[in-house]
Image: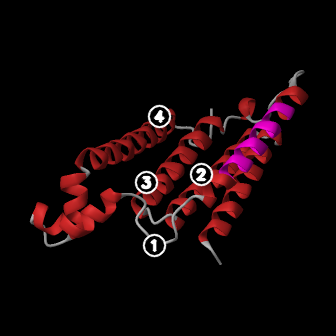
Amino acid sequence: MPIETWLTFLLGFMILGSIVALEIKDILSSIVAIGVVGLAVSLAFLFLQAPDLAVVQFLFEIFALIILVRTFIRKDFHVMEKASSGRWIIGFTLIGLAAVFLLSLKVFRVLPPFGEPLMETSRYYLEHGAADTGAANIVAGIILDYRAFDTLGEVTVLLTAILGTLTVLRFRARDGKGGGR
């Protein structure tokens, strides 16, 4: 099955998950629905041959879910009130999501064939990477020499997510109440 078919399925799944997250009245269930959308983004990165982004997205999604669940576990935050302008917001959201879906289909059609480099930069890395970096492992050479700032940014995102998770968990543990306040 072509990769574009999988990406189209994932995009539809993410849009469906977003609609479910908007429509569910229980905030914790809505958080889980958003988490499913993030995990679908991680799968899309895997299909697009970007495993480093997939791992970062997956870990960030797990940490964000932990933080959000621990934050909203309190009973007084658990159920949302019905908004008076809900139908208008839902209508605009559905129209916006349909537009994103239709425009994304056009983007999938112009992707290069699966396995082909997306840019000339990729081809340059493959042809000159070992000689330019002197690294025995071309992946390590690309990550640490050509894309060092990008890697530093990814590590910073992971560190921030871990620190945020630890802060929320430590705050709850210090309360001594564990499950909520």
Dot 4 and dot 3 residues touching (CB under 8 Å):
no
Q: Amino acid at mark 3?
A: Val
- Amino acid carrying label 2: it is Gly
Main SS of the magenta part reads helix
Q: Residue 123 at x, y = what percent?
A: 31, 65
For disc 3, the marked residue is 56
Dot 4 amino acid type: Phe
Query: Earlier along the polypeptide chain: callout 4 or callout 2?
Result: 2
Residue sitting at 25 percent across and 63 percent down? Answer: 125
Question: How many marks do you count on the picture?
Answer: 4
Dots 2 and 1: beta carbons under 8 Å? no
Alpha-carbon distance for marks 4 and 3? 25 Å
Residue at point 26%, 62% (across, down): 124
Residue occupying the point 50% across, 56% down = 58
Q: Nearer the viewer, mark 4 or mark 1?
A: 1
| Residues in magenta, as a range | 91-104
Which quadrant is home to the C terminus? top right
At which x and y percent is residue 37?
A: 65, 52
Tell me which numbered mark, 1 or 3, is placed earlier along the sequence: 3
What secondary structure is marked by label 1?
A: loop
Closer to us: 69 or 148: 148
Q: Earlier in the sequence, mark 4 or mark 3?
A: 3
Q: How far is the residue under mark 1 from the one under mark 3?
A: 22 Å
Q: Quadrant of the N terminus?
A: bottom right
**In this picture, residue 109 sits left or right of residue 85:** left
Q: Residues within 10 Å of mark 1 (few under 14, many from 20)?
A: few
Q: Find the distance from the CA under tag 2 to the CA under tag 1.
A: 24 Å
Q: Is residue 8 above or below residue 19?
A: below
Q: Which residue is mark 1?
A: 115
The residue at which mark 2 appears reads as: 38
Q: Is residue 142 left or right of residue 170?
A: left
Q: Is residue 62 above or below residue 30?
A: below
